Image (tube, helix red, strand yellow):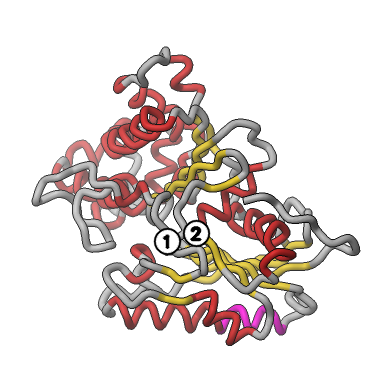
Amino acid sequence: MTAPSLATGAPRGFVVADLGGTTLRIGRITEGAASAAAVRRVPTEGLGRYRELPAQALQDRVVDQLTRELEAYLGSPGGEGASAVGVSFAGPMTKDGTVLAGPTLWGGAAAPLPLADILNRRLGVPVVVANDITAAAWRYAAAEPDPFCLITVSSGIGHKVFRNGEVLVSDSGHGGEIGHWRVDPGEDAVPCECGGRGHLGGMASGRGVLLAARRAAAGDPDGFGRSALAEPAGGDPAGITNEDLARAVRADDAFATQVLRSCLVPLALAVNCIFTAIGVRRYLFIGGFAVAVGHRFVTLLGEELTKLGCFGLGDAEIRDMLSLGAADDDHCLIGMARLLTRTLPATACTGGGT
């Protein structure tokens, strides 16, 4: 869509929130600023903490938490005087802000969630809701002159392609969910939190790599015992954490690196598929797990991608397509503020976006 003309005057202040599968972040950002201030982080009260609850109960719990935390923030010194609220959400949604699924938040099927309408009624200020990777893409849009694909590797995996001033998704919420591309058709494939099997997100996300590391440690106790993962885990495969795994990969630990390599093969297939289908040659990686591993993440992914090859490109060109985004967790907060700036005059902040 074409950016509307912005009203003149003093920069506006926004409250922005990022609702992820692991963490809910809320902060304040001034229109045009490059960072958020007074950011509050709390664990998301969803699937990651309450796996025993059914999907609908988890959805209700997450919405109540989001509303409660936003109300408290708006009433605090950090949130007073905000002209609008922007919320990025880890799941597909329609253009009007109706959430279609929340795999990393409540797992399987639950009712469609008109999140934009709910928050507009409850908060008493204009609200925009957008998919988290759509929001994050706006952080990078001004600095990336060519089309790019933003991929997050955290609790799950998601992506968005940004081209010609817009994110390429349909109004009905389709597109940008490469984490639910089925890369393993086997009946015994790794389960995904959405209820499917063999999905990229279940295999190559932070949660997927962690499960793979624990399975590998249980299946190869000698290799695990020699690994840098053994001591912090107390010799117990179940004690391995994502933090320890990322640290071991950064230190070039052979066991941990091989686990990650095996999980990066399907991610390399996904990048290969996107490149072959639409020709995008710029891939930015964000998300807690990718950032924690750091440059080793894109180095190892580049090695797996060159093994596959990208039609028409040499090895150096393939590796040059891959980069890490900023080494922080504010992508969605900053991008959401830029999306608010773009949409606020045209929509009066009453809708959402995919």
Left or right: 317, with 238 as reference point: right
> How would you classify the magenta stretch by its main secondary structure?
helix
The percent position of residue 186, horizontal first and vertical second, equals 11, 46
**Of the residues shown, which amino acid type is indicated by label 1?**
Ser
The percent position of residue 45, horizontal first and vertical second, equals 43, 75
Residue tagged 2: 354
Left or right: 196, with 103 as reference point: left
Instruction: Indicate which label's residue lies in the foreground, 1 or 2.
Output: 1
* Foreground of the two, 152 or 83: 83
The percent position of residue 73, horizontal first and vertical second, equals 67, 78
Find out whether the residues at labels 1 and 2 contact each other: C-beta distance under 8 Å. Answer: yes
| Mark 1 closeness class: few <14, some 14–19, many ≥20 residues within 10 Å | some
Badge 1 element = loop
Residue tagged 1: 172
**Magenta segment: does it hold 71?**
yes
Name the residue furthest top.
314
Q: Is residue 312 above or below residue 283?
A: above
Left or right: 291, with 205 as reference point: right
Residue drawn at (46%, 64%), measured in percent from left and top?
94
**Magenta segment: does it hold 66?**
no
* Foreground of the two, 45 or 95: 95
Judge whether residue 235 can be spotted in this image.
no
First to last magenta residue range: 68-75
